[in-house]
Amino acid sequence: MTNVLMLFSSPRHDASLSTKVAMALSNRLVSELGASITVRDLAVDLLPHIDPAYAIGRFVPVAERTPAQIEAVGLAETLVAELKAADIVVIAASMINFGPSSTLKAWIDHIVWPGVTMVPSHEGPRGLITGKKVFIVAASGGIYSSGPMAANDMLVPYLKQILGFIGLSDFETIRVEAQSFGPEDALRSVDAALTQVATLK
């Protein structure tokens, strides 16, 4: 069975267009692949920002960890296990001030783990999370895929770079753009994104 990890991160919850398009993708994966979906809504079940308990605790031998370190590292281990178990990762990401939401960034900070998801070396990092397809559903108020604002896109390039750092390399981006330009532009963008979902091969 194909396992899918679905990450929602928009603070707009049910009104989120990245969530709407990601759900359409999820439904197609279930219908066509019989996929099993693991959902983590980062905007509802908020992850803590990383703190000393995690930053230090993950390098402390298990038997020597404090209760706070055990809890913090245990959460990261759960998140990494979800990622490792997935064949497909779907990230519904709303652009916030040109980049990812703090909720999505907190997830990234927990799963980028030296010695666990990547190995640092003098020759550069070696990612340990490989062989997975990643769909990035990126919603934004403006148009960042091309044109004068493209240089300000610190969402999609960042996600590809940081996830590539841990070994992921097979990306498909679905854009839901122009959401601040008015209802007609917004609707056209959503329709285009849903069409892309329906015609993915």
Image: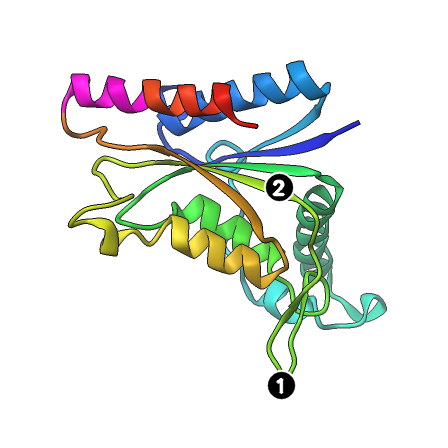
Q: Nearer the viewer, mark 2 or mark 1?
A: 2
Viewed as shown, does residue 72 lie left or right of 20?
right
Horizontal relation, residue 6 to residue 161: left or right: right
* Left or right relative to 87: residue 91: left
**Magenta residues, dominant SS class:** helix
Q: Nearer the viewer, residue 12 or 119?
A: 119
What is the residue that sits farthest to the bottom in this orientation? 122
How many numbered discs? Answer: 2
Residue numbers of the magenta segment? 182-190
Where, quadrant-wise, is the N terminus in this rendering?
Answer: top right
Check the image and report above or below for 111 versus 47. below
Q: Is residue 45 visible?
A: yes
The reply to whether the magenta stretch includes residue 80 is: no
Q: Is residue 91 left or right of residue 139?
A: right
The residue at 27%/33% (across/down) is 177
Give the number of the disc on residue 157: none
Describe the element under mark 2 as helix, strand or loop: strand
Where is residue 99 shown, x and y percent of the image?
33, 50
185 falls in the magenta region: yes
Between residue 158 and residue 33, name the one nearer to us: 33
Report x, y in % for residue 109: 54, 57
Q: Position of residue 170 (x, y in %)?
A: 58, 47
Precedes in sequence: disc 2 or disc 1: 1
> Neighbour class for label 1 at 10 Å: few (<14), some, many (≥20)?
few
Q: Return the residue at label 2.
A: 133
Q: Position of residue 63 (x, y in %)?
A: 85, 67
Q: Looking at the image, which residue is at 69% across and 57% down?
A: 73
Q: Is residue 23 visible?
A: no
Q: Amino acid at mark 1?
A: His
Q: Which amino acid lies under the numbered mark 2 shown in the image of this protein?
A: Lys
Q: Residue at x 23, y 22 (%)?
A: 186
- Which residue is the site of mark 1? 122
